Image (tube, grey):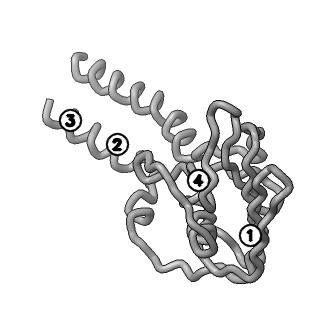
Amino acid sequence: MKRAFLVISLLMMIVTPPTNTAHRSISNHIPAATGITLTIDFGNGTELIYPKVEEQTVLDATENVTSVDVDWYGDRAFVISIAGVANDAESGLWWQYWVNGELGSVAANKYQLDNNDTVTWRRIPPTYSTPTQNNNDSSTLVALAILPVIGILVISIFHFRRS
């Protein structure tokens, strides 16, 4: 029984796909993006435009030029007010951001900006977009392919031990 446990443990260590979880926890300094143009569209004809903003994330860039109120959900920020103008659930008006014409797909504090990006905040009814890329984690697919092999090996080991 100990031998079977040892074999299974070794197989799992060999065939388990590596993850980069440890890498994610290391905080590397990411330099601020430069040349960002930030526009705030209040939805009533008023727009504020800020050229040459320098920051790392959409939220940082916005906080750099005006007041921003957020509610935190874990480590993700949900913007509830920009420049004193709040979301309005009754009217269905919510702050949403676009970067280079693409609707933001992550919380504003998670979107890493690149040099010369154009950020636009709009206070409008919710807009939804379909993802443009496949975000499947390949390590999950590899693990799903390997799992049946491990199961067959375990069954084989127990079958041959009984024989």
- Kindly report the distance in space between the C-alpha atoms of the residues bearing marks 3 and 1: 58 Å
Q: Earlier in the sequence, mark 4 or mark 1?
A: 1
**Identity, as a three-letter code, of the amino acid under mark 1:** Leu
At 72% from the left and 57% from the top, the residue drawn is 121
Residue where numbered disc 4 is placed: 81
**In this rendering, which labeled residue sits more in front, label 1 or label 2?**
1
Q: Earlier in the sequence, mark 1 or mark 2?
A: 2
Residue 149 pos. (x, y %) = 46, 31
Q: Secondary structure at mark 4?
A: strand
Residue 139 pos. (x, y %) = 53, 46
Residue where numbered disc 3 is placed: 5
Residue where numbered disc 1 is placed: 38
**In this rendering, which labeled residue sits more in front, label 3 or label 1?**
1
Q: Residues within 10 Å of mark 3 (few under 14, many from 20)?
A: few
Q: Secondary structure at mark 3?
A: helix
**Identity, as a three-letter code, of the amino acid under mark 4:** Ser
Q: Earlier in the sequence, mark 3 or mark 1?
A: 3
Residue where numbered disc 2 is placed: 12
At 56% from the left and 49% from the top, the residue drawn is 80
For residue 75, above or below residue 31:
above
Residue 159 pos. (x, y %) = 30, 18
Q: Nearer the viewer, residue 40 or 33?
A: 40
- Kindly report the distance in space between the C-alpha atoms of the residues bearing marks 2 and 4: 49 Å
**Identity, as a three-letter code, of the amino acid under mark 2:** Met
